[in-house]
Amino acid sequence: MKTLSYAQAIHDALVEEMRRDEKVFVLGEDVARFGGAFKITKGLLDEFGAERVMDTPLSENAIIGAAMGAALMGYRPVAEIMYMDFLHECSDQLINHLPKMHFMTGGKLTAPAVIRTQYSLGRNTGAQHSQFFPSLYMNTPGIMVAAPSTPADAKGLLKTAIRGSNPVLFVECAALYGSKGEVPDGDYTIPFGRADMKRPGTDVTVVAVSRMVGEALSAADALASEGISVEVLDPRTLVPLDTDTILSSVKKTSRLITAEDSCGTCGVGAEIVARVSERAMDYLEGIERVACPDVPAPFSPPLQKAYMPGRDTIAKAVKKMMS
Amino acid sequence: MRGFTRSIKLNDSISKTVLLSLYETMLRQRALEERVAELYKEGLIPGLAHPYIGQEAVAAGVCAALEKGDLIVSNHRGHGHSIAKGVSEQAIFSELMGKDTGMCLGLGGSMHSTDLQAGVVFSTAIVGGGIPLSVGVALALKMDKKANCVVCFFGDGATNTGAFHEALNLAAVWKLPVVFVCENNQYAVSVPVSKSTSARIFQRAQAYGIPGRFADGMNVLDVYAAATEAVSRAKKGEGPTLIECETYRYRGHGIYDSGLDYRTQEEINEWMSRDPIRALQQKLTTDKTATTEELEAIHSNVKSRVDEAVRFARDRPYPSEDLLTRFVWA
C-alpha cells in the first residue's frame, strides 16, 4: 500500500493503462502540454507523444464523436470533458449516440469509450460549473456511470472502465482531488456494480455518493459518540447499481438515508429510495434523501455553504430518524 | 434551380464496367425505395422511412469511388447509401420490416444501418449526429496508418447544426481521411435552403481551410469525379474535403409526407426532367456504350432481386422477445 491523492491515483491509472495497451489514448481540452485543467494528464504527452495525447478544440460534440468513432474501430479512447456541466454541450453524442451503438446495431458495434469528467461543487464556481447530475445517465440505458470517492476506488474503477466493452461516464469530484488515501500496490481493478461498505453499522444505512461518502463517514464518527451506529455504503458505480447490497443493509438497519451532491428531485437518492421501497417496504422505519435543494448552485460562499449537503445535514437526518 | 446544372459528359477513362455498375446501383436504389413505399402502404413497414428517390446519383457516384476497406457513415435517408456500398436488399428489407435477418437484427429500423463487411459503419437518425462520429472513424484509420478513408453523408439541414462545424473544424485541424458529402436536396423537411442557409454549402469549407467542391447531384459522373478527387486527397493524407451535391428528393421528407405542401408540382417536374437514371441511360445508348437489351437485362435482374428480397423478409418470423435486452450491454 502507498498513500496517494485522488488526482494522482487517476493519473496513475491512465499511465498504467496506456503502457499496458497501445489502443488506449487520451483526448480533450488542454490535456496535452497543459496536463488538463486539473493536471490529471500532466506528463502523459512526454511519455506517450502527441499521437496518443491529443488537445482538442472547444468542441464537446466533436470530442465525444471522435472518441466514439475511434472506439467503434477498436480503440479505447479516454476523453476528458473539463466540467460535468459541459456534458450538456455534447448530449447528442453522449446520450443519443454513444450508449445506443451496441443496441441499435444488434450487437455489431461496441463503443468502449471512457468519458472522464469532474464536478466542482464546493469550489465557489457558480451555477454553470458546479453541477452533479449522474441520474440523467442512470436514465439513459447503455452507458455505465462511475463516481468514485477514494483514491483506491478511483484507480481501480478507471482501469476497469478502460478495459471494459461498454461506454463509461467516469465522474470525478474536484473537491476530492487533493484528498489522500491508501492505494494497493501493483495492478488491480475494481468490478463495476459492487458497492463498498465504508463503515459497518446497525441503526441507519447511509448510501452516499462521491464527496458525500467522506461526509457520511465523518457524520458516523460524530454519531457513534452519541451511541448511534451508522452503516455507510458507497455504491461506487451508479450504473450498474448494486441494489442487493443496499437492500440487505436496509433490511438489517430498517432505516435508509441517501446522500449526494445533486439536486434532490430525480436524483440518485430518488432512484435508490424507489428501489428499496419496492422491494423492502415492510422493513422500513425511516427513509430520507439528503441532497442539494432544487436551486441552481450559488456563488457567494455563505450561500454555497447553505446550499451544500454535508456532515451536519446527514447527522441531522440520522438523529431525526432515530428520535 | 440554382444554375449549377452540368451536362453529362462521358469521360473516356471510365470503363464500361463502371458505367454499367453505376447504372445498376441507381436502379437498385430506386427499385428498393419504390417497393418500400408500397410495403409501407400495406402496413408491412412500420415507423419512419425517408425515400432516396431522386438522389441516387449521389451515393452511387460517391461509393463507386471507394475501394474495399473504405467506410461510410450514413443518415436517416440511408437506404440508397447502403445499396451503393454493397448491402443486400435482403438485409435492408428485413431490417425495415423488423425481422432478425436485418442488418441490425431489427433493433435499428429504417434509419439505422450497420454492415461492417460492406463498410457501412453506422447511420444515425439525428440530423448532423453522424458527422462527429465519422471524424472518430477517420481518426482510427489514421492511427492505424491505413490507406483507407471514410465518407460521411448528410443533408443540407445538417450543415446548420453545431456538430457539422465542430466536426469539420476538428477533421481539418487533424488532417483526417474523411470526405464530407452533403446531399443538398433543397429542403430540410419543408424549409428551403434559401431560407435556412447563409452561403453556398460548399463555400463553408473555406472557413475550415479545406477544399469545398460543388457537384451536380443529378449527374452521377460529376459526383463520381468529385468523389474520386476527394477520396484520393484523403488517402494521400491531405485531409478532408467537403462536397456539396445539389440534388432533389422527388418524394416527401418521409414516406408519410406528400411533399406538396411546400413545393409546387412544376418545381418537382423540372427536377424530374433531369432524372439521373434516365440521363445515364440515354447517354449509354446514344453513345452506344450499351445496347437497350443490355440495359433491360439489368432492369429485370434488379426487379427480381427486389422481389426475392421482399419475399425472403416477409416470410421471416419476428424476433423473439429475448432480443429486447440482449444488446444493451456488450
Image (spheres, coloured by chain):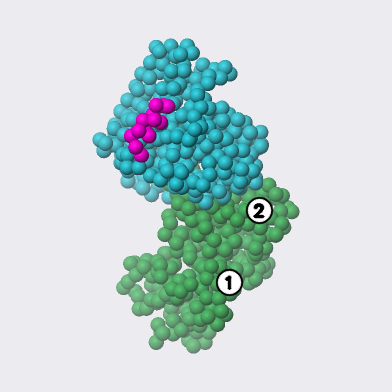
Q: Secondary structure beneath disc 2?
A: strand
Identified at 66% across, 53% down, the residue is: A55
Image colour for chain B is cyan
Whether residue A192 appears in magenta in the rendering, the answer is no
Image colour for chain A is green
CB under 8 Å between callouts 1 and 2?
A: no
Q: Quadrant where the C terminus of chain A lies?
A: bottom left
Identified at 40% across, 45% down, the residue is: B191
Position above or below: B295 against B93: above
What label does residue A27 carry, if any?
A: none
On the question of residue B276 being in view, the answer is: yes
Q: Is residue B320 left or right of residue A28?
A: left
User: Which chain hosts label 1?
Assistant: A
Give how far across and how far down residue B24 sits, in percent. Answer: 43, 22
Instruction: Please name whichever residue, A315 or A119, is drawn nearer the observer in this view of the structure.
Output: A119
Instruction: Please name whichever residue, A24 or B298, is drawn nearer the observer in this view of the structure.
Output: B298
- The residues colored magenta run B263-275
- Which residue does the numbered mark 2 point to in the structure image? A55
User: Which chain hosts label 2?
Assistant: A
